[in-house]
Amino acid sequence: MSNALTSRAADAALDDFRLTSSVEVNGLLRQMQSSNTLITLSGPEGHSYTTLLWSVDEPRGTISFSGDSRNTGLRALLASGEVQAVAYLDSIKVQFEVDGLIQVHGGQHEIINARYPRELYRFQRRSAFRVKPFISTGPVASFQHPASPDDMVALRVLDVSLSGVALLLPDNVPAIASGTKVPNCQLRLDEETWLDVSLVIHHATPLPEIKGFRLGCEIHDLDPGDRSLQQYINQTQKRHLALAPRKD
C-alpha cells in the first residue's frame, strides 16, 4: 500500500474519535483548564514536557500553557515544528496538535502561547481510573524530604490511581527534583486506607492559582495482595458520581 493510501486509511480510522465542533472543542479545553489537568507535550524526537493549560481564548485564536524555560525538554519542543498534546480528562484520553509554540513572560510566570486547536481527538477510557480524594478525609503522603532527611513533610494528595499519585508541594517547601526516589512513604487517603509505598517523582508542574507545584509521582512497592487502593478508587469514584449534579 502506498504512503498516501496508508495515510488516508489512518485518517479514516480516526474519524470516529475526531471532534471538530467548536462547542465541543472549547468545552474540553476549558474543562482541562478549570480542573488543572496535566497535559504532556511531546515531539517526534522523544522530547516531552508536562504542563497545565493556563488560558483558552477562542476569539483571539490562542491557548496558553504554563512553562519553565530552564527545562531542556521544553526548549527542544519550542524549536520543533511538530508538537502533540495528550491529557487524560475524566479517565478519557484527549489528544490534539499544538502549532505555533512561542514562549512569553506573563507577570511572575512564564507562559507558552500556541494557536487555538480546531480539532481534538477523544479516545477510549483508560482501564485505571484516576480520582480526586475528598479534602475532608485529609489525604496526605508523608515522607522524609529527600533534600533534608531530618525533615518530614506531609503533602496533600491531589489525585490518585493504581499506578500514580499527584501531590501538592507548597512553594515554601524545598523543591524535589524529577527522577528522585522516595523509598519510604506513608500514603493516607482516609481513615481506612493507609499504604506504605515508595514513590518516583516524574515532574513538578507550577499550579496557576495556587502557590506551589503539582508533583507527578509513580507508585512503587505496593503490596500486590493489598486491594485497599482499588477499593478506595472504586468507592471514591462512586461517591463523586453520586454527588454530581443531575442533567435533565
Image (spheres, rainbow, N blue to C red):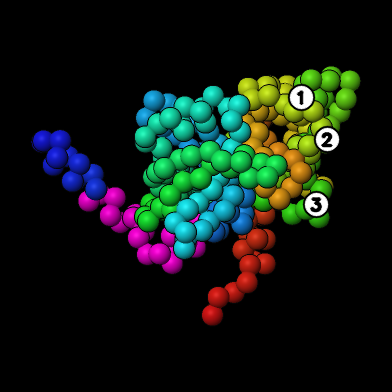
- Disc sitting over residue 172 in the figure: 2
Q: Which residue appears at 84% of the width and 19% of the height?
A: 149
Tell me how far mark 2 sits from mark 3, CA to CA.
Answer: 24 Å
Specify start and end residues of the magenta stretch as a single range.
Answer: 12-29
Mark 3 or 1 closer to N-term?
3
The reply to whether the magenta stretch includes residue 28 is yes
Check residue 184 in the rendering and tell me which mark sits there, or answer none. 1
Packing grade of label 2 (10 A; few <14, some 14-19, many >=20) is few
Q: Residue 155: x percent and y percent?
A: 79, 38
Whether residue 41 is visible here, answered yes or no, is yes
Quadrant location of residue 239? bottom right
Where is residue 198? Give x, y as percent: 70, 26
Q: Is residue 49 above or below residue 91?
A: above
Give the amino acid type for the residue marked by disc 1 in the picture. Asn
Quadrant in which the N terminus is drawn: top left
Q: Residue at x 67, y 67 (%)?
A: 243
Residue 214 at what x, y percent from top left? 68, 39
Three-letter residue code for mark 2: Asn
Judge left or right: residue 85 versus residue 164.
Answer: left
Tell which tag, 2 or 1, sits nearer the viewer: 2
Q: Secondary structure at mark 2?
A: loop
Do residues under tags 2 and 3 come within 8 Å of each other at their CB atoms?
Answer: no
Name which residue type carries label 3: Thr
The secondary structure type at the circle numbered 3 is: helix
* Residue 31 belongs to the span the image colors magenta: no
Residue of label 3: 137
Quick one: SS at disc 1? strand
Earlier in the chain: of badge 2 and badge 1, it is: 2
* Residue in front for this viewpoint, 233 or 111: 111
